[in-house]
Image (spheres, rainbow, N blue to C red):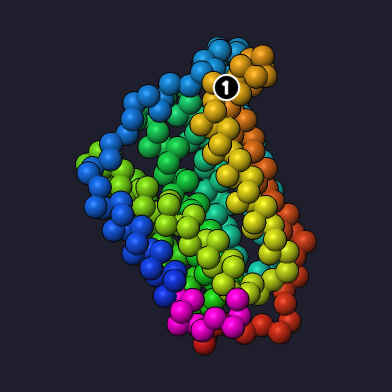
């Protein structure tokens, strides 16, 4: 991949952004499907409604706290971006728990707000650690764009901007990982996180089927929370164990 000209690499990433933007905004307005809020496991526990979907968010809290703890005293050059990434994971725990306590569009906002922050913070991490540290200067702008996508949905009911932010990120993140060398070792853990997150999204879709297969032990959505948190914890482990590559050169001059 290193033999591919820099301009072509950057063009591929830009084409992915613009192509997905055109695809989403060439579609009619996308509104939230209310059936999304219908989860199979609604069993209460100790007065907590939808208990499994509420309580499994503790795994997000643990993954986020592990990451924040690892950053303490760490001299990592992208510390600010990683901080907001792990902080967003911590905030997903109460946000998602609140949503699952009473699932509807108004509570879903508090689930998606920290997720949008996390997507954008991680994206800046990848750009900064694979192309140039200069990208970290755009961290707060990127987070603002993520939050704005939720604001657009709230005030217009249109999810196209939010879906574009998510989908374009998932499309371009593998491109960045494949096209550009990292400034650090243990890069393979990014791919493990992507695979686990993909599995988490699959079991989420199979909410009812997982519930039935496990004899009502756990639903697909609750299992999604656990798997997603494990995938995110892999990034904590990456930061904990990786080493900076000594021969380090930004693709774009600092």
Q: Nearer the viewer, residue 62 or 39?
A: 39
Disc count in the image?
1
Please tell me which residue lies in front, 141 or 1: 1
Relative image position of residue 101 (x, y in whole percent) = 48, 22
Give the class, few, some or many, for how many residues have Cα within 10 Å of label 1's Cα (few <14, many ≥20): some
Residue 17 screen position, x and y as percent: 38, 63
Above or below: residue 80 compared with residue 65 = below
Q: Secondary structure at mark 1?
A: helix
* Image-quadrant location for residue 211: top right
The magenta region covers 1-10
Viewer-side residue, 86 vs 105? 105
Residue positioned 60% across, 51% down in the render: 194
What residue appears at the point 35 percent right and 48 percent down from the top-left corner? 162
On the rendered structure, is 171 left or right of 58?
left
Q: Quadrant of residue 221?
A: top right
Res 94 seen here: yes
Position of residue 189 measured from the top left corner of the image (x, y, whole percent):
69, 57
**Residue at left offset 41%, top offset 25%:** 37
Residue annotated with mark 1: 209
Task: Look at 62% across and 84% down and name the residue there.
Answer: 249
Does 225 appear above or below 172?
A: above
Q: Based on the picture, tell me whether residue 5 belongs to the magenta stretch.
A: yes
Q: Is residue 70 visible?
A: no
Let me know if residue 103 is in the magenta part.
Answer: no
- Horizontal and vertical percent position of residue 168: 42, 57
């Amino acid at each position: 991949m290193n033999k591919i000209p820099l301009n072509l690499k950057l063009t591929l990433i830009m084409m992915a952004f613009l192509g997905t933007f055109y695809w989403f905004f060439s579609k009619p307005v996308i509104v939230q499907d209310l059936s999304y809020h219908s989860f199979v496991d609604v069993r209460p526990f100790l007065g907590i409604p939808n208990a499994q979907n509420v309580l499994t968010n503790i795994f997000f809290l643990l993954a986020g706290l592990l990451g924040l703890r690892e950053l303490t005293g760490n001299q990592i050059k992208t510390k600010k971006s990683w901080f907001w990434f792990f902080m967003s994971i911590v905030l997903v725990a109460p946000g998602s728990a609140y949503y699952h306590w009473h699932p509807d569009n108004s509570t879903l906002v508090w689930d998606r707000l920290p997720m949008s922050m996390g997507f954008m913070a991680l994206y800046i991490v990848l750009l900064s650690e694979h192309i140039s540290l200069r990208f970290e200067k755009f961290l707060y702008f990127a987070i603002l764009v993520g939050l704005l996508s939720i604001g657009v949905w709230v005030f217009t009911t249109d999810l196209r901007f939010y879906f574009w932010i998510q989908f374009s990120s998932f499309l371009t993140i593998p491109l960045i990982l494949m096209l550009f060398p990292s400034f650090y070792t243990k890069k393979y853990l990014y791919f493990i996180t992507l695979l686990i997150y993909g599995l988490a999204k699959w079991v989420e879709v199979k909410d009812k089927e997982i519930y039935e297969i496990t004899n009502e032990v756990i639903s697909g959505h609750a299992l999604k929370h656990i798997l997603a948190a494990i995938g995110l914890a892999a990034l904590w482990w990456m930061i904990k164990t990786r080493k900076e590559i000594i021969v380090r050169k930004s693709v774009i001059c600092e």
